[in-house]
Image: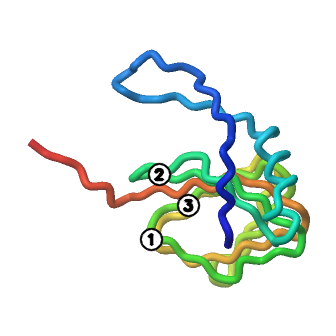
Amino acid sequence: MEIETLKPNLDKVNNNNLSDSRLLGFDLPSLIETMKQSYTWANGELNALVLLKSPGKNILLTAMHGGTEILSFQTKDSATFQIIEGSLRIRIKKDTVTLNKGQLLTLDENIKYRLIAEEETVFLLTVSSTNMSSSSN
């Protein structure tokens, strides 16, 4: 899987210095259009754009051509798939779940899965670490 390094225009929705946090807004239709005009999309099976990368969470906007299959993938962290366009089949062992536009699925950590897009599909993939170290006093 190749991850494209586009520099999207990330509009800040609000920055009121609330505990040093940032609120970022993303124009997903515009980002999807940009992804679909990229070299990676034109010459590959999928394209992914990192929207957020932090120690405990990564969010990727992912687009897959129809007929694309990611044969085997497992992460030690939990994963959430939210379908924006198209549909995505997710195989876990002998079970298969089909997610359609607007649907969301969360997998616990350490689950091996396979992704299949029979049609052009765009989804948000959120990977969250469950083993974040916390400081105690």
Q: Distance between the residues labelled 2 and 3?
A: 10 Å
The reply to whether discs 2 and 3 touch (Cβ–Cβ < 8 Å) is no
Marking on residue 76 = 1
Q: In which quarter of the image is the N terminus?
A: bottom right
SS for dot 3:
strand
Q: How far apart are marks 1 and 3 (CA)?
A: 9 Å
Tell us which disc is closer to us: 2 or 3.
2
Q: What residue is shown with label 3?
A: 79
Tell us which disc is closer to us: 2 or 1.
2
Name the residue type under label 1. Answer: Lys
Q: Position of residue 101 (x, y in %)?
A: 82, 50
Q: What residue is shown with label 2?
A: 57
At 47% from the left edge and 51% from the top edge, which residue is drawn?
57
| Marked residue nearer the N-terminal end (2 or 3) | 2
Crowd rating for badge 2 (residues with CA inside 10 Å; few <14, some 14–19, many 20+): some
Is 54 or 130 nearer to us in this picture? 54
Is 65 or 7 nearer to us in this picture? 7
As drawn, which residue projects farthest toward the left? 137
Crowd rating for badge 3 (residues with CA inside 10 Å; few <14, some 14–19, many 20+): many
The answer to whether 127 appears left or right of 48 in the picture is left
Q: Where is residue 9 in the image (x, y as percent from the top left)?
A: 68, 35
| Vertical comparison of 125 with 96: above or below | above
SS for dot 1:
loop
Q: Distance between the residues labelled 2 and 1?
A: 13 Å
Marking on residue 124 = none
As drawn, which residue projects farthest toward the top? 16
Count of numbered tags: 3
Which of the 4 quarters of the picture holds residue 120? bottom right
